[in-house]
Amino acid sequence: MPVPTFRLLHRAALAAATGALLLGAAAVPSHADAGRPPAGFHPELDFAGSTVAAHEGRSGTPLQSLAVTQTKGADVSSWQGNVNWSNAAANGARFAYVKATEGTGYTNPYFAQQYNGSYNAGLIRGAYHFALPNASTGAAQATWFVNHGGGWSADGKTLPPALDIEYNPYGATCYGLSRAAMVSWIRDFSTTVHSRTGRYPVLYTTTDWWTTCTGNSSAFGTTNPLWIARYASAVGTLPAGWTYQTIWQYADSGPLPGDQNYFNGAYDRLQALAKG
C-alpha cells in the first residue's frame, strides 16, 4: 500500500527534528522553564506513533486469525484535519482516540470535530495527550490535558484518557530523564488524571522505549491499561507488569483515518472499558 503523502512529509520533518538522538541523553531537566516548549516545537507533527516507524520499522501486518476477537479502531490528530467519521464507521471503526493536547500550551485545533464527530457517528471515543516529560511536571501536563478535552464520563461512549509517551521527537530518546525520574513523571501524570477523572490513563508506548527509558518498570501494570505500538504481524513481548495489551496500534496507515488499532476483545468488552 503506498505511503500517504502526509506521512512522507512527516518523516522528512521528523528526521530533521530527531538528528540530536545520535548525541545521547541530555542532562536531567529541572523544569525551571516549566511550560516552555522545546526548540523547534512542532506539535502538528507529534501524534501517537509519529516516532515509532523511524526507530522500530515495520515488519508485516497482523495475522488474520487472532486468539481473541479484535475490535477495530483508529487514532487521529491534527494531521487528519476534519475526519469523515461516517466513512470510518462504514469501514469497521468502532472506537477512536483523538489527540487533545501536548505539553502545557498546545491544543489540537481539530479536536472538537474529531472528538464530537466520532461520537456522533456511533464510535466510542477518548482523548490522548502527547507527553513532553522534560518540559514540565506530569501533574502540570495532566491538568492541562484534563482541562482541554481529557476528561471522562461514565456514559459508555467515552474511553479513559490516554497518555502517549514515546521517543522524543526533539532530542534525546528519554527526554534527558533518568529511568527513575521517568517512572516518577509518569506516576505524577497518572495519579493526577485519576484524581481529576476517576480513571487511570491508558498508557501508549512501545516495549523498546519503555524498556530503555523506564528500565522496564512494572509499576503500572495493575492500574493502567496498555496501548502498545508495534507494526508487525504479532504484538510481541509486552512491557513488564502487563500480561496482555488492551489496544494494539498495528499500523500507521490503512483503511481507517490515521493509525490502525485493535482493541483486544469483542465490542462488549470495549463498552465495559468505557463504562469503567
Image (spheres, rainbow, N blue to C red):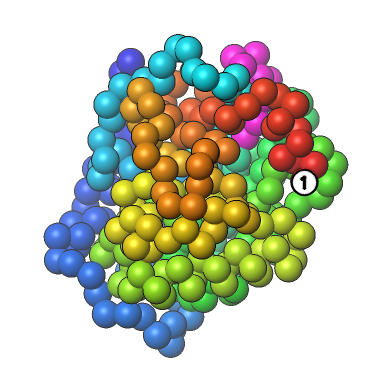
Q: What residue occupies the far right of the structure in this picture?
A: 155
Crowding at dot 1, Cα within 10 Å, few <14 / some 14-19 / many 20+, comes out as some
Residue 96 appears left or right of 232? right
The total of numbered circles placed on residues is: 1
* Secondary element type, mark 1: loop
Quadrant location of the N terminus?
Answer: top left
Residue 165's quadrant in the figure?
bottom left
Residue 115 among those drawn in magenta: no
- The x, y position of residue 61, in whole percent, is 37, 20
- The x, y position of residue 136, in whole percent, is 48, 75
- The x, y position of residue 247, in whole percent, is 54, 36
Give the residue displayed 27% in from the left and 26% down from the top. Answer: 59
Q: What residue occupies the far left of the structure in this picture?
A: 22
Please say if 251 is above or below 9: above
Q: Say which of 32 and 153 sits in front.
A: 153
Residue 195 appears left or right of 4? right
Magenta segment boundaries in residue numbering: 83-96
Residue 3 appears left or right of 244? left
Give the residue displayed 37% in from the left and 34% down from the top. Answer: 236
Q: Say which of 218 and 250 sits in front.
A: 218
Please say if 139 is above or below 271: below
Give the residue displayed 44% in from the left and 82% down from the top. Answer: 31
- The x, y position of residue 112, in whole percent, is 69, 44
Residue 86 among those drawn in magenta: yes
Residue 54 appears left or right of 162? left
Residue corresponding to mark 1: 276
Q: Is residue 46 visible?
A: no
Please say if 102 is above or below 115: below
Q: Is residue 274 visible?
A: yes
What amino acid is found at the position of numbered circle 1 in the picture? Gly
Give the residue displayed 54% in from the left and 53% down from the top. Answer: 221
